[in-house]
Amino acid sequence: MNVASFFPENIKAALKNIPPGEWIPELPEDCIRLHCGYPAPALVPDKELKAAVASLLEEERDLPLHYIGSPNILKLKEQIKKRLEERGISVSEEELLITSGACQAIDLIARIILDEESIVAVESPTYMEALEIFQNYTKHLISIPVDKHGLQTDVLEEILAERKRNGLAQPRFLYTIPTFQNPTGTTMTAERRQHLLELADSYNFLIVEDDAYGELSFYKNLPTLKAMDKMSRVLHIGSFSKIVAPGMRIGWIAGAREIIHASAWFKKDLNHPFAQATMAVYLANTDFEAKLLTLRDTYRGKCAVLLSALEQYLPESASWYVPEGGYFVWMKISGVDTSKMLAAALAEGVSYIPGKYFFMNQADGTEFLRLSFSYEDEKEIAEGIRRLGRVVEAGL
Ligand SMILES: Cc1ncc(COP(=O)(O)O)c(C=O)c1O
């Protein structure tokens, strides 16, 4: 029987896209992992989370193991609200939804806002999983380039104006990672943020602000788009994945009440009350500001090691952006197809993600690659870049 014949056309079309996770290379043993955007293992608070689980079950017995048993779930919402306030975002109970990571937040927003005809504007390059999600709902993605100051809002304006002149539909929303972008590590300037908000008003679209790395600044905290948003156009997405542990699968959306209502409607109970209750106990027992300082110091140090190794080992043909936070360094190697080079890099024992996966039009990413300094320790990072330098010098 052809079971796949039961899929409706939109699902059949989505299943023809690039398969999820295709960018993850098959790693040889002892490979230095500069591809993965995971937190440093030493910074994942396993002991503290273990203690949180123990005290949760000790105090509440079976309660946290029911659908929404633990009062700590409500507490988590309060804790997230408080953290948002510290970033200049003030939301009510009805304007905040806890999700299974930022990915579920992106998916829910796509689900409630998009149909097959909808236009979505994305940064180019952008987070590949968001590209995958949007393409599950619509084929109509428009790419707006990013330079070292983030999204090029002047290019966005030209595209919007031209669409208007030609009577074409405007995007339902623009998806942006304005702070320490994945994959470029860049941060949108204050002027561009303001410009983007004005464009959203003039051309009537929503802004989805993915702030997964926003708190991992090396130097100074930056205002979020949501904090600047007077018109409720910004749907702000956050996550504990990069600052506590990705396996907890806890993220959130802060935005207009109608959006939160519809997102909650479709989310139903597809989340993890036990993980949420555990996170609430963990946060209550943790000096999180001190934890953030440790994260920032550690990632600043790792990034510095990676950058100085790049200076030392990479030839003139390579150039890169210097990030001010987050997990990533974006590199261009002129005249090199980084997808083809990957096999040689893996054979040398170092991994990266070829740039093509971050673009709608994959050919735009041929000469680029993403390096991550988050996961490996400083010694491995330096050795990984030394190996990469050898591969680049050797040519293909
Ligand atoms: C920009 C961006 N958004 C969202 C996510 C996913 O976050 P979560 O683990 O909370 O789903 C990532 C993870 O790599 C990311 O880079």
Image (tube, rainbow, N blue to C red):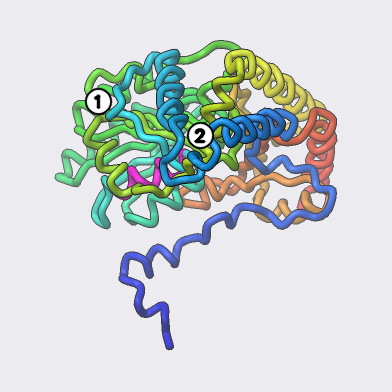
Which disc is residue 277 wearing?
Answer: 2
Looking at the rendered structure, the number of numbered marks drawn on it comes to 2
Residue located 59% across and 26% down the image: 282
Confirm whether residue 126 shows in the render.
no
Q: Secondary structure under badge 2?
A: helix
**What segment carries the magenta color?**
102-111
Q: Secondary structure under badge 1?
A: loop
Q: Residues within 10 Å of mark 2 (few under 14, many from 20)?
A: many
Quadrant position of the N terminus in the picture: bottom left
In front of the other: 114 or 348:
114
Kindly indicate the quadrant of the structure image that contains residue 300: top right
Where residue 334 appears, as percent x and y from the top left, is: 65, 40
Q: Which of marks 2 and 1 is in front?
A: 2
Q: Using residue 369 as the reference point, say whether residue 121 is left or right of it.
A: left
Confirm whether residue 170 shows in the render.
yes
In front of the other: 136 or 202:
136
Amino acid type shown at disc 2: Ala
Which disc is residue 232 wearing?
Answer: 1
Say whether residue 107 is magenta. Answer: yes
**Mark 2 CB within 8 Å of ligand 1:** no
Q: How crowded is mark 1: few (under 14 residues within 10 Å), some or many (20 or more)?
A: some
Where residue 116 appears, as percent x and y from the top left, is: 27, 57
Q: Is residue 221 above or below residue 44?
A: above
Residue located 25% across and 18% down the image: 230
Query: In terms of sequence position, does the residue under pointer 2 or pointer 1 come before the other?
Result: 1
Say whether residue 168 is magenta. Answer: no
Kindly indicate the quadrant of the structure image that contains residue 49: top right
Label 2 and label 1: CA atoms lie apart by 29 Å
Residue located 51% across and 24% down the image: 214
